[in-house]
Amino acid sequence: MKTQSANLRSAERSQQTRPAFVYHFNYQGTHYYFTNLDQDVVISGGPVAKMADPQTFTASQIEHSRPEQTFEVSPSAVAVVLPATDVELRKWFLSSPIKTVEIQIWRINSSLLPGPVAFADLSMEFSGVLDGIGFEDYAITATAVSLMLQEDRPIPSINYQHPCNHQLYSARCGVVKAVYAVTASIAAISRIDKWLQLNITSVNVGNPVRNIVITEDFYEGGFGEDAAGNTVGIISSTLVPATGVKLYLNWWPYTLAVAQNITVYPGCRRIIKDCHERFENLPNFFGTPFVPNNNPAIDGINT
């Protein structure tokens, strides 16, 4: 949640306000400071890792597009435009694409301009990295994205996803594949519909071993290995009352046949129920299933 100082909120509520921003670029320890105000701005009490105390932000014809705030997780870029009349500055930007260039943008408490302004009275507008740099005449144009969304990476943290992010049977998941293996004889097949039937209604799995009654979703997302070494994914399954289970495969090896043995492994729907009841692996669940999925401002506070 974004927070603002009381001084900044008071200034923003006034009938006359003068929107102003300060910009900090960090290229491998080389720092540049600009402001879009028509005179230099002095900031005091800033973090040691980002600026001196006090720090002067140089007046420049710099501007940026306002960052979008939506439910989408695509890397919507913030465009930054800066004049490149300074030869050294132009050289810096020309060489910068080979390494990460960090950028922070803060909104200033307009009532205190031109300063000194306490860093506590600034509001973070954007923080990220430059993702592309170009030139037009003497202007530098750059796009910036938040570090989390750079390169279209998936959301990397449990703080943003309800389901688990671990790959089943991986080292981070912690579930040992071998103790959930069940070998059974194929009772019936349908090459056209790509299913095979196993006459099993419960399995002894886990460590220590326990008996689990097979449900329709038990093998959903799992896989099987036949005698020839082929691995086939299990898309879904249905129960055959009092007899066994049909497994629908994502492809059909020509080696599969009735009476042949196949080893099958249960799947995981990446929900907390499967992790707890099927695999007894709740401490390794890598998700946040109870995070609200509605926005009270849009859907209403009672939804």
Image: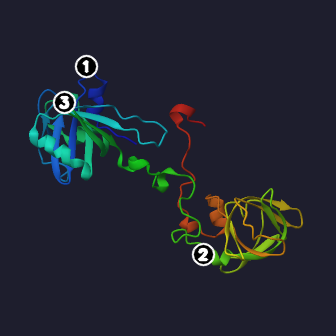
Residue ranking furthest to the right: 242
Label 1: state its secondary structure.
Answer: loop
* Residue underneath mark 1: 16
Residue 55 visible within the image: no
Front: mark 2 or 3: 3
Amino acid residing under circle 1: Gln
Q: Residues within 10 Å of mark 2 (few under 14, many from 20)?
A: some
Tell me the residue that label 2 is attached to.
176
Which secondary structure lies at badge 3? loop
- Mark 3 residue crowding within 10 angstroms, few (<14) / some (14–19) / many (20+): few
Mark 1, mark 2: which one is toward the viewer?
2
Query: Quarter of the image containing the N terminus?
Result: top left
Q: Position of residue 88 (x, y in %)?
A: 10, 43
Q: Earlier in the sequence, mark 1 or mark 3?
A: 1
Mark toward the start of the polypeptide (1 vs 2) = 1
Tell me where residue 235 appears, x and y as whole percent: 70, 58
* Nearer to us in this view, 208 or 91: 91
Q: Quadrant of residue 217?
A: bottom right
Task: Give the mark nearest the N terminus, 2 or 3.
Answer: 3
Residue, far top: 15
